Amino acid sequence: MVDKSNHGIRADAVRQWRNKMSDKQQTDRQLQIRKIAGEVMGLAHDGILINMRFLDVELSRLKVECREQTGVNLFDGITLYYDPALLLQRYRNAPHYAARLYLHTLLHCIFSHAVSADKLNRTYWDLATDIAVEHTILEWNLHLTSLPSDDLLRSRLDLLEKQAGGLTAERLYRHFRIEEPSENAMQEWHKLCYY
């Protein structure tokens, strides 16, 4: 005769042990992702510093912080918060993604885009500043920040420049206020210029 109550206790103990092991493996994986993403961001920083020494002061001012499980990269005007899993996923598809994200955010700081938008239509201002920053990055033509979507972005920028009369954030904002972009156009620009 088998004591079934004892079997149930052992089965529970095995389940608990497996859950602990699974939790430990998950924690180890998260730590590894965080570590690798930090190294990728460090390499992006160093690559920009080596290729664009004139940005050294601004690079030292920009704070960069890991924020897990946000699913987005955010910038509050002072700190770039990156999601390590998202960063590595995009890095896998585009090895220069981290440097592009870093430089994109740095240019927002240099151009003071975050502090200029108090009384503006925030949606149009954010779009205009993202496009202006991306235009600047493409003008510099750095291999370090090249992405697979750059050719498409260049063709869209050429057309927009003719329509708006220039690609500064201020000109683009005025253009968007006069000729409001469609929802499809907003989504396309978002895919091309938002990091």
Image (tube, rainbow, N blue to C red):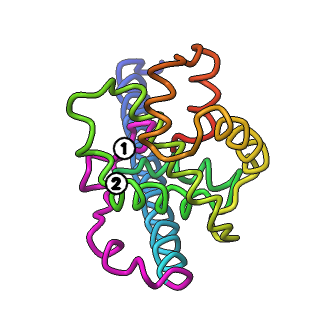
Q: Amino acid at mark 1?
A: Leu
Residue 183 found in image quarter? top right
Q: Are marks 1 and 2 in contact (CB under 8 Å)?
A: yes
- At label 2, the amino acid type is Leu
Residue furthest toward the front? Answer: 165
Residue drawn where x is 44% and y is 56% of the image: 28
Q: Nearer the viewer, residue 187 or 81?
A: 187
Write the residue at 42% across / 27% down. Answer: 124
- Checking the image for residue 74, the label placed there is 1
Magenta segment range?
A: 50-79
Q: Residues within 10 Å of mark 1 (few under 14, many from 20)?
A: some
How many residues crowd mark 2 within 10 Å: few (<14), some (14–19), many (20+)? Answer: some
Nearer the observer, 17 or 165: 165
Closer to the camera in the image, 83 or 21: 83
Q: Distance from label 1 to label 2 (Cα)?
A: 6 Å
Q: Which residue is mark 2?
A: 80
Whichever of callouts 1 and 2 sits on the residue coming sooner in the sequence is 1
The picture places residue 67, in percent across and down from the top left corner, at: 33, 48
- Secondary structure of residue under mark 2: strand
The residue located at (67%, 42%) in the rendering is 157
Q: Is residue 10 magenta?
A: no
Residue 155 as seen in the image, left or right of residue 177: right
In the picture, residue 164 is in which quadrant? top right
The residue positioned 42% from the left and 44% from the top of the image is: 73
Secondary structure of residue under mark 1: strand
Q: Foreground residue, 146 or 170?
A: 170
Position of 115 relative to 3 (above/below): below
Q: Position of residue 130 (x, y in %)?
A: 48, 43
